[in-house]
Amino acid sequence: MTKRKLLFLTSELEPFNNLSDIATKISELPNELAGCGLDVRILMPRFGTINERRHKLHEVVRLSGINVMFNDEDFALTVKVASLPNSKHRLQIYFLHNDDFYNRKNDYLDDDGKFYDDNSERMIFFNRGIMETVRKFGWAPDFIICNGWMTSLVPFYARTAYGSDPIFTDSKIFFNIFDEGFKNPLEAKFLEKALLDGAIKEDKGAEFKPATHTALCKGAIQYADAIILNTHSIDSELNKCIMNSKKPTFNRDLPSENPKAFFEFIDAFKPIIESEGA
């Protein structure tokens, strides 16, 4: 039987960086899912705080030449790869980088503890960069797990701008919600830029428009196939959105849940794939 393919998206992962509870709560998840027979690939930003020498990152030449376009600008994307340390399954992590967006000594906050003004653009670059990188892979994921607000545009893009692309057409998308967010809204022009120069109609992204952490999660929920909870303190507005969506939900924050149960939740979304020639 052909292995089902899982695209795992995150802005943080131990031991590369640990910005919030996200890294802690998902650190073992890629290995657990690979252990259940999934072909797992991990994508994350290559923040300046990630030490390339220590983690043995090297550029993926075959993925060179990718440009990410939005806000009528063209941004160069560099993809580097490393192995996940101590992984029995030899998992690979692909780091998406742009010198202007990520070559900084801090991740989201400047030296004064202020949220970077261009975090919205850094997020858009990462999300569209994911779509373009996976297209260049030529690797159609059966499942996509989006971890946290930094990945919240991927379900949106997969069902709109990239909706007719066979790479994403059959992907089942899961959005993973955590306690960690951000306090103040992103820039006022966030949605305008996220619409990729008019490639997506404004009404399709209405949920995202307030550009708050809650709004990003609501937008992701609208376009995802299912929801994962890694929190027990979800705000009432977001909880109402989840309830109204009536989409399948898995709560990983419950002590009774285990890796096998989570895999079964994910796997139930795809039919059995027979091996070629079967």
Image (cartoon, rainbow, N blue to C red):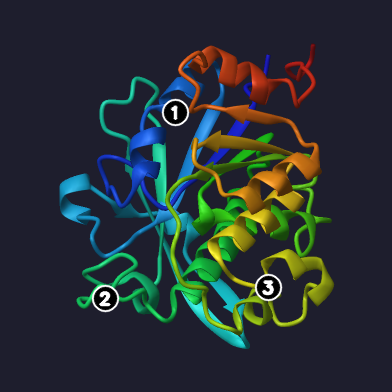
Residue kind at label 1, given as amino acid type: Leu
Question: Which residue is found at the position 26% from the left and 26% from the top?
Answer: 86
The first of marks 1 and 2 along the sequence is 1
What x and y, as percent, mark residue 100? 37, 79
Label 2 SS: loop
Horizontal side, residue 104 vs residue 183: left or right: left
Corner quadrant of residue 107:
bottom left
Question: Which residue is found at the position 68% from the left and 73% from the top?
Answer: 209
What x and y, as percent, mark residue 22? 40, 43
Marks 3/1: CA–CA distance: 31 Å
Horizontal side, residue 191 vs residue 114: left or right: right
Q: Which residue is mark 1?
A: 29
Q: Residue furthest bottom?
A: 72
Q: Is residue 207 above or below residue 138?
A: below
Marks 3/2: CA–CA distance: 25 Å
Q: Which residue is mark 3?
A: 209
